[in-house]
Image: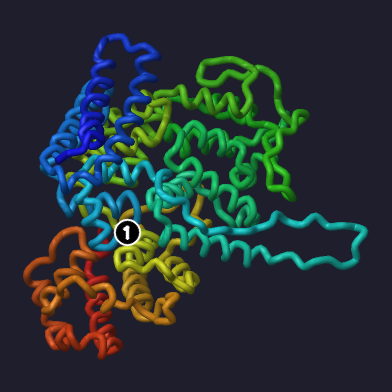
Amino acid sequence: MMSTHHRAAMRWPFRVLVGAFLAVASARVTAQEVDRLAAAKAVAQKAVSEIAAAEKAMPAEYAAVKAAYAAATELHVALRGGLKPLPLNSWDYTKARHLLVRAGFGGTPQDVAKLHAMGLHQAVDTIVDFQLQPAPNFPFEVAPPQRADPYKITGAREEPEGNKLQRLRLWWLKRMVESPRPLQEKLTLFWHGHFATQYSVVQHSYTFYQQNQLFRDHAAGNFGGLLYGIVHDPVMLRYLDNNRNVKGQPNENLAREIMELFAMGVDQGYTQADIKEAARALTGYTYDHFTGQFRFVTEQHDDSPKTIFGKTGNWTGDDLVKLILEQPSTARFIAGKLFAFFASDNPSPDTVDRLAGVLRNNQYELTSLLRNLFLSEEFYSERSLRTQIKSPVQLVVGMCRDLGVRDVVDYAALEGAIRGMGQELLEPPDVKGWREGRSWINANRLFVRYNSGSDLLRSIAQTNNRRGIDVVALLDGKGITTSAEVVDFLAKTCFVRPLSEQKRKELTDFVADLPPCTQWASQRDQVNERLRGLLVLMLSMPEYQMT
């Protein structure tokens, strides 16, 4: 018998969501209606999470609620714009894994199965609303540079910059592997590549830690807030020489890159005159080396009128951000970059316009765009599935997450492997960031990928005092009894799509001489060595290099 509480909860999503979305169907939407829509959606999302536990006891009712939620989403897209959502009956295990890999770094078959069982909408909500997941408890301490005390002959020795930098890299890598909020870390990585800066130029680990936290705090927040943060960011100000941008001698570096690379794109409706005026608006924006804090030096700021994008005023750097956010090209540029990162390269103009509309209609709130993207047919289309070459970070972190490794002792080995493959955290090649896709693959790098993956599988140190991936533990309790079942399970772990029959047979033959599973515990080391060899073969396949 269904309880009164569950019956009431089951009615909430349909009653609140559909009613709220119908409220915006009129030609003129008032501010109050928009506020009610946002509030209703929040209530509905809470209600959906409350009834998830009732699914097994009430499958028919639960299915009806999910259908109503999907119908309401389609109505919302029809009324407010965005990409067409994926039909509920198209949601399957493969698409659940695609979501977990692209919106994070991957996960075990159990992680994927759990996401698949949620259904499309709850799965996307779980990924996107990561702030509802426990915050990872990974403390990190780094101090700003010490100011010399002229009255002291000796003092405490300051930690070398190189040590601070390496600790910061390993701390971030640990977050990517272990955090219960994978999308937050994936977006932090995206923004680091988008707002690219190089430690070798700035050489200030404390401000790099602050910048990394800026990207994390605003990961799926408001793009406008993030852009405001960037023009106050000591790393960016130093990297693009804005600390030398003063009244009477403007430096155009930050003004140019904020338009061309960070917010609007190349040749998107602005002129060289706009860049020069924007540089004047940014004069006086600098930082204090010893505190690592932003400083606005009034006497270095050009306070005379400036004309930017055809508007004249006594603009500051903050005003410049506001003017940039008003330009139509800004939403399109950011929407296109996010689609290319999460889905596929070269999106159609219509796709970009639809996503840009979502961004503009939600005042640059990134969560709305990400939710629409991860619910869309296009995200799960053949153009998106298994079409991206994994970056070194995605390859190594994804291997750990796919194989359930969450307790690494020596992250330096992982960081060294990533660097050997051509990607160095906090050191992208230049202000344009990393070149994704085929740039990660050449004859030398492919060789390093295969060797590094093999080395990590066999030697990665974990807290259980074992070295190498414990594949026996990964297979334990899965009901696996034959070599074919071993291959099928590990293929499900490593690949987006099933293997061809020929490759499946070759891999099955490789482990055909495994002892019976009842003897695995007593022969753990020998069995693990054989199974790691199987994983090495899998990780060396072209299919594993794709996501």
Q: Residue furthest right?
A: 151
The percent position of residue 36, horizontal first and vertical second, equals: 36, 19
Residue neighbourhood size for the residue with mark 1, other residues' Cα within 10 Å, grouped as few (<14), some (14–19), many (≥20): many
Q: Tell me if residue 316 comes above or below residue 199 in the rendering.
A: above
Q: Residue furthest top?
A: 28
Q: Nearer the viewer, residue 532 or 44?
A: 44
Position of 530 with respect to 299 (left or right) is left
Task: Assign the C terminus to one quadrant of the image.
Answer: bottom left
Q: Tell me if residue 50 comes above or below residue 397 in the rendering.
A: above
Q: Is residue 84 visible?
A: no
Position of 408 with respect to 143 (left or right) is left
The percent position of residue 391, horizontal first and vertical second, equals: 36, 59
Instruction: For mark 1, give the secondary structure.
Output: loop
Position of 11 with respect to 170 (left or right) is left
Q: On the image, which quarter does residue 331 sit in? A: top left
Kindly identify the residue that appears in the image at 24 percent across and 26 percent down: 77
Q: On the image, which quarter does residue 467 sit in? A: bottom left
Q: Tell me if residue 212 comes above or below residue 175 in the rendering.
A: above
Q: Nearer the viewer, residue 498 or 254?
A: 498
Q: Is residue 89 visible?
A: yes
Kindly identify the residue that appears in the image at 47 percent across and 67 percent down: 415
Task: Assign the N terminus to one quadrant of the image.
Answer: top left
The percent position of residue 2, horizontal first and vertical second, equals: 17, 39
Which residue type carries mark 1? Lys
- Total numbered labels: 1
Kindly identify the residue that appears in the image at 17 percent across and 29 percent down: 71
The percent position of residue 95, horizontal first and vertical second, equals: 19, 50
Q: Which residue is mark 1?
A: 390
